[in-house]
Image (cartoon, rainbow, N blue to C red):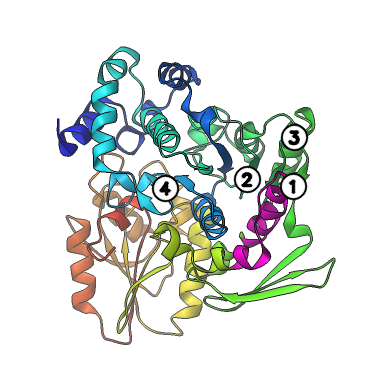
Amino acid sequence: MDYQESLDFLYEQLPIFQRIGKAAMKKDLTNTIVLAEALSNPQHDFKSVHIAGTNGKGSTAHMFASVLQEAGYRVGLYTSPHLKSFRERIRVNGQLVSKEFVVDFVERCKNLMVEVKPSFFEMTVIMAFEYFSKEKVDIAVIETGLGGRLDSTNIILPELSVITSIGLDHEDILGTGLANIAREKAGIIKESIPVIIGDLASEAKEEVAAVAKQKKAPVFCPSEWYETLVLADHHIRVVNRDTKKSIEFTSELGGYSLLKNVPLILEGVSQLRTRGFAISDQQAVDGIRQVVSHTGLKGRWQKLRVSPTVVADIGHNEEAVRELMSRLDTQRQGAKLHVVWGMAGDKSIESIFRLLLKDASYYFCAADIPRALSVNELARLGDEHKLNYTTHDTVSAAYEAALANVHKEDWVFVGGSTFVVAEIKDI
């Protein structure tokens, strides 16, 4: 079995959320526990940081990993989904998991997979844990896939739990309303393990606090004492309101929607120090600043071209789209905007369409996944919201059409779905 055959087996034999949605989800952690036990529980061989959240959890995971790398640790990083290569999901010090390991893992575990019938995500989580054990990482940063309580990653005992944000997404799975979603994400909180939370709505914060109290886990909300000021697109200042100390730096990441999570990293560093990790203030800043170089983070306000300016971002729920549209409207400074847009069919489509900028030209398309919202449905919504649009059979065709219609002073934005961004050739 070669690498492509191994991937084909994973994709074809195992139910995968990006293809079939909710049907790929499992009702408990039984499969994950069985798989882990069959491999001698590799998740116990390394320390970890566990990160959940509606938005920002992926970029925050990358920033944590970058800081720990900068401090000299050997760091595993597990995130999902991937954009171009399956191997992006599993990294050690920014390097993708080797093809050889993937092949070996599938060959060793093929019979186990047939017997247990895990989901694609369950199997890739265990693959990551096995790889981190084999590579003898000092610590791994683990991003949840969806929710927290029943997420396959939730068999680790971390040094630190982090909840970046809580918004309305995947309500068909996590429950309706902020309280239910918060309760599910708070499921990553462990007995007496510190938890750091973002600036949550009061309803969500109360639910998280209740779970933390039950688990005797101390809660830290750094937005209460840190203020983040975006001075320019990639330049920020973080001020500690209590000590009046501030740090100022330029990051490879841009935008308030991402950099507002910097206080989570700074507080995380403080908590990790109490647990024996040696990380200086400068290493923390340098790690945040160089996150793209250190970890290979892509798809977050990623500038693909200049003249015309071409930007891609994977933000795909209501909160993320609201911030993206605001940022686009501000930064283009009146320039003509062309938007290559597609969505998954299980999102809050109507509420998201109400956020789309009315003066842009839209190039509607569907990513090559069964969950994608059809072009016909996008067109119906475009008519309903009085948008200027054209429809295209593929993401590539939509992207090429947008590029063919732009002037050098125009802007092109690609988004609406992780899987639309993944099909862009320039990523």
Residue 199 visible, this orientation: no
**Marked residue nearer the N-terminal end (2 or 4):** 4
Q: Which residue is mark 1?
A: 274
* Bounds of the magenta segment: 262-285
Q: Which residue is mark 3?
A: 212
Looking at the rendered structure, the kind of residue marked 2 is Ile
**Marked residue nearer the N-terminal end (3 or 2):** 2
Say which quadrant the C terminus sits in: bottom left
**Marked residue nearer the N-terminal end (1 or 4):** 4
Q: 365 left or right of 387?
A: left
Residue 121, image x and y in percent?
Answer: 38, 32
Determine whether the residue tagged by mark 2 lies in a helix, strand or loop.
strand
Q: Which secondary structure dominates the residues rendered in magenta? A: helix
Residue 234, image x and y in percent?
Answer: 52, 75
Q: Which residue is mark 4?
A: 92
From mark 3 to mark 2, how far is it between C-alphas? 12 Å
Res 28 label: none
Nearer to us of marks 3 and 4 is: 4
